[in-house]
């Protein structure tokens, strides 16, 4: 029996978005009278043309959809000892960004040279009022795009289609999707389903009833990056999964409520762990929050687990993310062979939320705060009275509102948001004393590390 063609492939069969009944050649408005025979054979949405001349003119571009569909039909997950039920599906080609949109330094090469130039620096940038306004604009765009993506979630949609929605919504606002080609990440957002902790690559797997999915959005606008993510329910989700999602959200809210001048970065992990562990869940130690603004990832590192050794203290003008990843089972992770997708070691589910936070003179500002137009999270739907709209509000009193710092929180990591930390390294070093071993590094990939490379501060890692 033929497999159903994912809706997102319709975009590829009609890339110029021509009206029905009109020739699909971009420069032609004549009625279409011919059908592509290969599309018919592959049971694709049929491309239509007015003449053989137009068909031949479009053939090179149009034929790529035929190859894509054949690759999809022949795709097999790479051989691997998977920890859960999820399997990778076919990944469509990388999308392009219009020339007029300003791009980060890695857009063409995949190498963030500006980040690498400060790799060994522990200096934390304090942004000027002008810089903060630029970051705020990028965060506004990031929030709008995440909300667009969140509203698109439904049973049957593929994560590739969500990525297309994110890509088009981002460039429509004059921004560049920060994950795209960051250290060769192939897509414009991260979509992490069920046991995926972070950095899931959008593909042609349709979402299923009962899934949970995290969408991690990052936008680069006029020289500044924004970063945020949220975890959503797909259809009818079990109560255990809902508990993970709500606990993660609440842990982020509580951590944010303590952001103020003078708070040590290491304290956020204590706050998050206390809430998570009393709910019988675990905090991922392999990835952490990070500084953001002119660079996608930079100091400080913000570990989310207790008794971490992060160095530094909050000062007005600093901007960073807090983005706890919480597992139903053990905290340890495993990396798929794509070098990006991080899954739970025991195959149990994981959730994440993330915000970009500004330290103010009196407290904090959530630059990526939810708005009245944000799609409701599951508990807000269940009890309308609990639904809260939170324009990026500034909060003066830190510890006063532990339960809800601004009202609503949101949550990458991979290429992009989360970063490997020293706790994961310490756990591995106990097992492999005096041997070289693989440990996650700043680019989210594995590299050789010696025992003498131990640091008190968390290893910086990109999304």
Image (cartoon, rainbow, N blue to C red):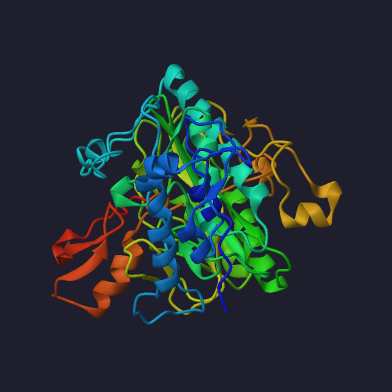
In the image, residue 117 above or below residue 276:
above
Decide if residue 124 is in sight here: yes
Q: Residue at x 25, y 80 (%)?
A: 431
In the image, residue 416 above or below residue 342:
above
**Side (left or right) of 189 relative to 441:** right
Place residue 303 in its image quadrant.
Answer: bottom left
Q: Residue furthest bottom?
A: 81
Quadrant into which the N terminus falls: bottom right
Q: Residue 361 in the image: state x and y as whole percent.
A: 52, 25
Q: Residue at x 43, y 55 (%)?
A: 65
Place residue 3 in its image quadrant.
Answer: bottom right
Q: Residue at x 74, y 36 (%)?
A: 372
**Side (left or right) of 425 relative to 361:** left
Q: Nearer the viewer, residue 216 or 270?
A: 216
In the image, residue 202 above or below residue 61:
below
Q: Residue at x 55, y 54 (%)?
A: 46
Q: Residue 7 in the image: state x and y as whole percent.
A: 59, 56
Q: How many marks?
A: 0
Q: Residue 390 in the image: state x and y as whole percent.
A: 70, 36
Decide if residue 257 is in sight here: no
Q: Residue 143 in the image: state x and y as whole percent.
A: 58, 38
């Amino acid at each position: 029996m033929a497999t159903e063609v994912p809706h997102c492939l319709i975009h590829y069969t009609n890339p110029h978005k021509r009206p029905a009944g009109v020739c699909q050649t971009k420069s032609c408005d004549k009625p279409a009278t011919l059908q592509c025979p290969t599309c018919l054979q592959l049971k694709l949405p049929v491309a239509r043309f007015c003449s053989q001349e137009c068909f031949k003119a479009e053939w090179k571009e149009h034929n790529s959809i035929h190859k894509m569909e054949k690759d999809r039909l022949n795709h097999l997950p790479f051989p691997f000892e998977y920890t859960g039920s999820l399997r990778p599906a076919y990944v469509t080609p990388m999308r392009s960004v219009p020339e007029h949109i300003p791009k980060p330094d890695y857009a063409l090469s995949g190498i963030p040279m500006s980040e690498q130039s400060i790799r060994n620096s522990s200096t934390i940038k304090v942004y000027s009022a002008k810089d903060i306004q630029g970051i705020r604009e990028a965060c506004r765009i990031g929030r709008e795009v995440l909300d667009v993506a969140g509203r698109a979630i439904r049973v049957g949609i593929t994560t590739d289609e969500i990525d297309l929605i994110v890509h088009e919504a981002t460039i429509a606002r004059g921004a560049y999707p920060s994950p795209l080609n960051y250290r060769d990440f192939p897509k414009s957002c991260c979509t992490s389903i069920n046991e995926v902790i972070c950095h899931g690559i959008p593909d042609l797997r349709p979402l299923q009833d009962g899934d949970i999915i995290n969408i991690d959005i990052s936008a680069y606008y006029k020289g500044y990056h924004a970063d945020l993510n949220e975890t959503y329910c797909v259809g009818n989700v079990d109560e255990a999964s809902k508990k993970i999602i709500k606990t993660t959200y609440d842990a982020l809210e509580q951590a944010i409520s303590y952001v103020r001048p003078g708070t040590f970065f290491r304290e956020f992990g204590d706050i998050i762990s206390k809430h998570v562990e009393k709910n019988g869940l675990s905090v991922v130690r392999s990835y952490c929050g990070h500084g953001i603004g002119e660079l996608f990832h930079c100091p400080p590192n913000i570990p989310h687990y207790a008794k971490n050794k992060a160095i530094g203290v909050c000062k007005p003008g600093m901007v960073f993310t807090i983005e706890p990843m919480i597992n139903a089972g053990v905290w340890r992770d495993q990396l798929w062979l794509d070098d990006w997708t991080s899954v739970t070691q025991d195959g149990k589910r994981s959730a994440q939320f993330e915000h970009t936070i500004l330290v103010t003179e009196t407290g904090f500002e959530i630059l990526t705060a939810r708005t009245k137009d944000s799609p409701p999270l599951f508990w807000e739907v269940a009890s309308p009275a609990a639904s809260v709209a939170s324009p990026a509000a500034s909060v003066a009193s830190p510890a006063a509102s532990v339960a809800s710092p601004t009202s609503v929180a949101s949550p990458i990591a991979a290429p992009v948001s989360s970063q490997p930390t020293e706790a994961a390294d310490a756990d591995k070093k106990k097992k492999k004393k005096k041997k070289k071993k693989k440990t996650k590094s700043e680019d989210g990939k594995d590299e050789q590390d010696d025992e003498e490379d131990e640091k008190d501060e968390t290893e910086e890692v990109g999304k």
